[in-house]
Image: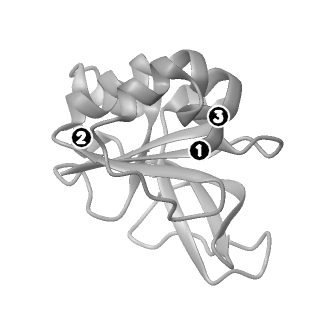
């Protein structure tokens, strides 16, 4: 199963914004919605293509209410998430899955909350340690080269 995690903007309650609007509510109706981190909405889809299609369906709401749209595709990695742009590029065969691991955005996780990200480039097997805050854990997101340089 492919997982999707939407991270709400700081000034909104993402789940409320999504389920209070008919079109978004209908798009999400068949999914079991969860909140793995503060102000997130997570769900499972059947495939990478279904995840990207759902994000496309929700685009109007995501642009307004979400800071991040993340996809965890087991055929790419069991632990590292993909940005929405990278997930779409892999689905469209514009980027090979095994060539997607160089550019990373690493979020700190503390008390169930995602903290500001740190951008790093993978040069070996070990990732630089997240050092922006004291954290309990990290969440690693693979991003496109364009997202990395933005």
On the image, numbered disc 1 is attached to which residue? 15
* Disc 2/disc 3 C-alpha distance (Å): 33 Å
On the image, numbered disc 3 is attached to which residue? 17
Q: Nearer the viewer, mark 2 or mark 3?
A: 3
| Residue that lies at the very extreme toward the right in this rendered image | 11
Residue 14 or residue 149, whichever sits in front = 14
Q: Quadrant of residue 133?
A: bottom right
User: Do the residues under discs 3 and 1 have CB atoms within 8 angstroms?
Assistant: yes
Residue appearing at x 63%, y 61% in the figure: 107
The mark found on residue 135 in the picture is none
Q: Is residue 53 visible?
A: yes
Q: Is residue 106 above or below residue 95?
A: below
* Disc 2/disc 1 C-alpha distance (Å): 30 Å
Residue appearing at x 44%, y 58% in the figure: 34
Mark 3 residue crowding within 10 angstroms, few (<14) / some (14–19) / many (20+): some
Q: Secondary structure at mark 1?
A: helix
- 66 sits left or right of 5 in the view: right
Q: Quadrant of the C terminus?
A: top right
User: Do the residues under discs 2 and 3 have CB atoms within 8 angstroms?
Assistant: no
- 88 sits left or right of 145 in the view: left
On the image, numbered disc 2 is attached to which residue? 97
Q: Nearer the viewer, mark 2 or mark 1?
A: 1
Mark 2 residue crowding within 10 angstroms, few (<14) / some (14–19) / many (20+): some
Q: Is residue 23 above or below residue 131?
A: above
* Disc 3/disc 1 C-alpha distance (Å): 5 Å
- Provide residue 22's location: percent of width, then percent of height: 50, 20
Q: Quadrant of residue 51?
A: top left
- Provide residue 92's location: percent of width, then percent of height: 24, 19
Residue 141 or residue 28, whichever sits in front = 28
């Amino acid at each position: 199963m492919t997982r999707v995690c939407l991270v709400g903007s700081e000034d909104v309650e993402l789940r409320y914004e999504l389920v209070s609007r008919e079109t978004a509510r209908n798009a999400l109706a068949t999914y079991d919605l969860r909140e793995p981190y503060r102000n997130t909405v997570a769900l499972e889809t059947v495939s990478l293509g279904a995840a990207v299609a759902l994000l496309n369906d929700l685009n109007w709401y995501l642009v307004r209410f979400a800071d991040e749209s993340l996809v965890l595709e087991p055929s790419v990695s069991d632990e590292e998430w993909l940005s929405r742009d990278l997930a779409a590029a892999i689905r469209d065969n514009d980027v090979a899955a095994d060539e997607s691991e160089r550019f990373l955005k690493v979020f700190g996780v503390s008390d169930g909350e995602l903290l500001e990200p740190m951008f790093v480039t993978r040069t070996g097997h070990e990732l630089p340690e997240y050092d922006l805050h004291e954290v309990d854990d990290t969440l690693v997101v693979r991003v496109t080269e364009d997202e990395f340089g933005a």
